[in-house]
Image (cartoon, rainbow, N blue to C red):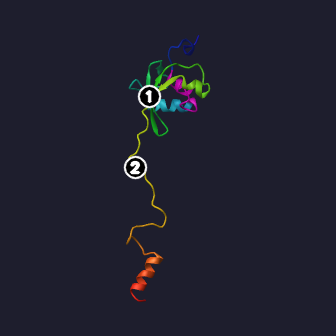
Amino acid sequence: MAAEETGEKIRLDIWLWHARFFKTRSLATKICKAGKVRINGTHAVKPSAPVKPGDVLTFPQAKQIKIIEIIAPGVRRGPAPEAQMLYKDLTPPPEKTAKSFKPAAAGKRGAGAGRPTKTERRAIDKLMDR
């Protein structure tokens, strides 16, 4: 009987792959070897580090830092709904920005900024009696 079946410890890289945080096991191994994964606040530099239910993992994924609590070790890499039952997501929701950036409408600019437009050039010519 394997460790996965008894509900005990499982390798970190295998668990990350089973829980579908990484597309391949080699990607999960690469993140672990780079020292980017923390188990209960301690850096895990080996992909073979054992994890068990109750451990809290912190690791980067895409442009976000994930905080995950392990609920179950997982036996296989199954479908997404099955994988979501292996963990509890503790990641705080993204912060709302105070004001989102909207670019100015095309052709609009402040008065006196830059080169005069055709309309402004005609008004200048009319003013100068040209």
Query: Which numbered marker is on residue 90?
Result: 1
Which kind of residue does numbered mark 1 sit on?
Answer: Leu
- At label 1, counting other C-alpha atoms closer than 10 Å, the crowd grade (few under 14, some 14-19, many 20 or more) is few
Q: Quadrant of residue 115?
A: bottom left
- Looking at this view, is 13 or 84 the one in front? 84
Q: Nearer the viewer, mark 2 or mark 1?
A: 2
Instruction: Report which quarter residue 123 is drawn in.
Output: bottom left
Residue assigned mark 2: 99
Image location of residue 97, percent across then percent down: 40, 45
Mark 1, secondary structure of its residue: loop
The answer to the question of whether label 2 and label 1 lie on touching residues, with beta carbons closer than 8 A, is: no
Q: Quadrant of the C terminus?
A: bottom left
Q: Nearer the viewer, residue 110 or 38?
A: 110
Residue shown at the point (62%, 27%) measured from the top left: 79
Label 2 secondary element: loop
In percent of width and height, residue 26 lies at 56, 31
The residue sitting at the bottom extreme is: 129
Instruction: Specify which label sits upstream in the sequence, 2 or 1.
Output: 1
Residue, far top: 1
Residue 67, image x, y percentages: 44, 29
In magenta, the rendered stretch is 11-25
Asked if the stretch drawn in magenta spans residue 22, the answer is yes
Residue 39 colored in magenta in the image? no
Lateral position of residue 94 relative to residue 82, left or right = left
Is residue 77 toward the left or the right of residue 41 in the image?
Answer: right
**Three-letter code, disc 2:** Lys
The CA span between labels 2 and 1 is 26 Å
Q: Residue at x 56, y 20 (%)?
A: 74
Q: Look at 43% across and 53% down and name the residue there.
A: 101
Residue closer to the observer: 58 or 91: 91
